[in-house]
């Protein structure tokens, strides 16, 4: 997906006031990346009056019902991995040695969930936790070719979607913009535009080392795993905007 198309997609995420409608629209847009389904699960949402999770999926209703009736949330290895980690989870790398897990994935295939999957754990400053997942039915070889390109894009999409879901649920997002200096914001904006550290140093008339310093400070302030993650969070929460 071209950069301008990606940001156009992100701008359109907040147009609907219904979470499921936005999920369905996003699913349609992501078919361009070779993806089939989207799943979003969030817990510990501050405004939720019940302990029920915030959920939006594009899976078949039959699979949703089957998943719920069999209490698969306690078995699903992707959910367990997400709760225990921060990095994106490739479903192909999930431990499937247990029979119950093998059966789970086999049944998911019966409902056309897809052979491949990626999940992005999201932990917020209000102690909420979310898991944004996508699936695809491409071959293993094609999946390995796709991954390097789609992971950075999906990381950005995942955080934008989470921000939208929180706002849709009536949660006021933390003011990340107040945490960042102007230099940090500027470095993040140029990085979001696809510029390298060297490019940014030339544009801003500072050393490449100083650029790295500002980006690392921004990453730490945003509780991000890396610069790409920091850009995703900054854009998603409105801490920065593109030029």
Image (tube, rainbow, N blue to C red):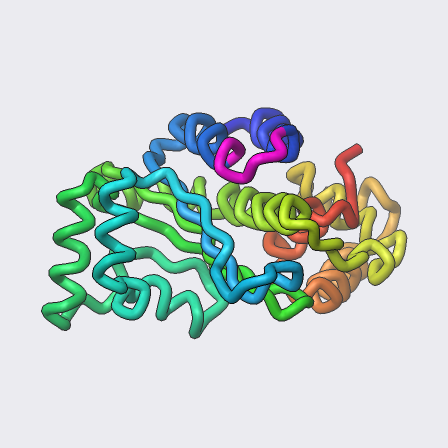
Which of the pair 42/170 is nearer the observer?
A: 170
Q: Is residue 94 left or right of residue 210?
A: left
Q: Is residue 35 left or right of residue 179?
A: left
Residue 19 colored magenta?
yes
Give, as a single range, the part of the protein colored magenta: 16-22
> Is residue 197 visible in this depiction of the protein?
no
Picture residue at 44% right of the left edge, 41% below the top: 150
Q: Is residue 165 left or right of residue 174?
A: left
Picture residue at 69% right of the left edge, 50% below the top: 170
In the rendered picture of this protein, how many numbered marks are placed on residues?
A: 0
> Is residue 140 visible in this depiction of the protein?
yes
Picture residue at 24% right of the left edge, 46% below the top: 63
Whole-percent x, y for residue 119 in the image: 40, 54
Whole-percent x, y for residue 193 in the image: 69, 37
Quarter where residue 215 is shown: bottom right
Q: Is residue 54 left or right of residue 237?
A: left
Up the image or down, 155 lies above or below 112; here it is: below
Which of the pair 66/153 is nearer the observer?
A: 66
Whole-percent x, y for residue 73 in the image: 32, 64
Residue 238 colored magenta?
no
Quarter where residue 194 is shown: top right
Whole-percent x, y for residue 114 in the image: 24, 42
Picture residue at 61% right of the left edge, 30% below the top: 16
Q: Residue furthest front?
A: 49
Quarter where residue 227 is shown: bottom right
Split into 4 quadrants, where in the image is the C terminus? Answer: top right
């Amino acid at each position: 997906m071209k950069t301008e198309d990606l940001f156009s997609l992100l701008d359109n995420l907040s147009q609907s006031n219904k979470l499921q409608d936005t999920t369905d629209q996003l699913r349609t847009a992501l078919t361009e990346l070779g993806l089939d389904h989207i799943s979003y699960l969030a817990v510990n949402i501050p405004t939720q009056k019940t302990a029920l999770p915030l959920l939006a999926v594009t899976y078949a209703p039959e699979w949703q019902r089957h998943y719920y009736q069999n209490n698969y949330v306690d078995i699903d290895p992707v959910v367990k991995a997400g709760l225990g980690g921060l990095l994106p989870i490739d479903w192909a790398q999930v431990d499937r040695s247990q029979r119950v897990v093998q059966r789970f994935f086999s049944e998911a295939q019966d409902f056309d969930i897809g052979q491949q999957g990626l999940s992005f754990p999201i932990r917020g400053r209000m102690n909420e936790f979310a898991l944004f997942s996508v699936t695809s039915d491409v071959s293993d070889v094609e999946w390995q070719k796709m991954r390097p390109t789609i992971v950075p894009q999906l990381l950005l999409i995942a955080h934008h979607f989470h921000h939208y879901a929180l706002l849709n649920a009536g949660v006021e997002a933390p003011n990340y913009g107040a945490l960042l200096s102007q230099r940090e914001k500027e470095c993040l904006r140029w990085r979001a535009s696809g510029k390298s550290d060297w490019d940014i140093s030339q544009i801003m008339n500072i050393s490449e080392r100083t650029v790295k310093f500002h980006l690392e400070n921004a990453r730490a302030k945003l509780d991000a795993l890396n610069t790409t993650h920091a850009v995703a969070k900054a854009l998603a929460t409105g801490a920065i905007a593109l030029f």
